[in-house]
Amino acid sequence: MAPRSLGWLSLSTTPDAQVMSTILWILAAVALVGTLGYMAVDRMLWQAQATTRH
């Protein structure tokens, strides 16, 4: 069974396009979560480094 659960978020009409759309939405979500996680850890490390300098 092909993943088509997020196909409604795009203008795709064919089943193949809905599968590709779902895969791209999942990849975009993973990239967003990874970026936000990186930014949060970077901020925590920056603050920890700033407090140890003073």
Image (cartoon, rainbow, N blue to C red):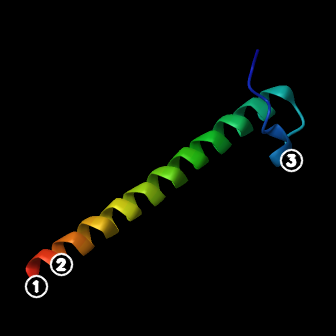
Q: Amino acid at mark 2?
A: Thr
Note whether 41 is above or below 27 in the view shown.
below
Note whether 50 is above or below 33 in the view shown.
below
Residue ranking furthest to the top: 1
Residue 50 visible somewhere in the drawing: yes
Label whose residue precedes the other's in the sequence (2 or 3): 3
Rate crowding at label 2 as few (under 14), some (14 to 19) or many (20 or more) other CA atoms within 10 Å: few
Q: Kindly identify the residue that appears in the image at 31 percent across and 66 percent down.
A: 44
Rate crowding at label 3 as few (under 14), some (14 to 19) or many (20 or more) other CA atoms within 10 Å: few
- List the residue tagged with mark 3: 11
Cα separation between marks 1 and 3: 55 Å
- List the residue tagged with mark 2: 51
| Residue 23: quadrant of the picture | top right
Mark 2 vs mark 3: give the one in front: 2
28 on left or right of 50: right
Label whose residue precedes the other's in the sequence (1 or 3): 3
Rate crowding at label 1 as few (under 14), some (14 to 19) or many (20 or more) other CA atoms within 10 Å: few
| Residue 4: quadrant of the picture | top right
Query: Residue 54 — which label?
Result: 1
Q: Kindly identify the residue that appears in the image at 70 percent across and 34 percent down.
A: 20
Q: Amino acid at mark 1?
A: His
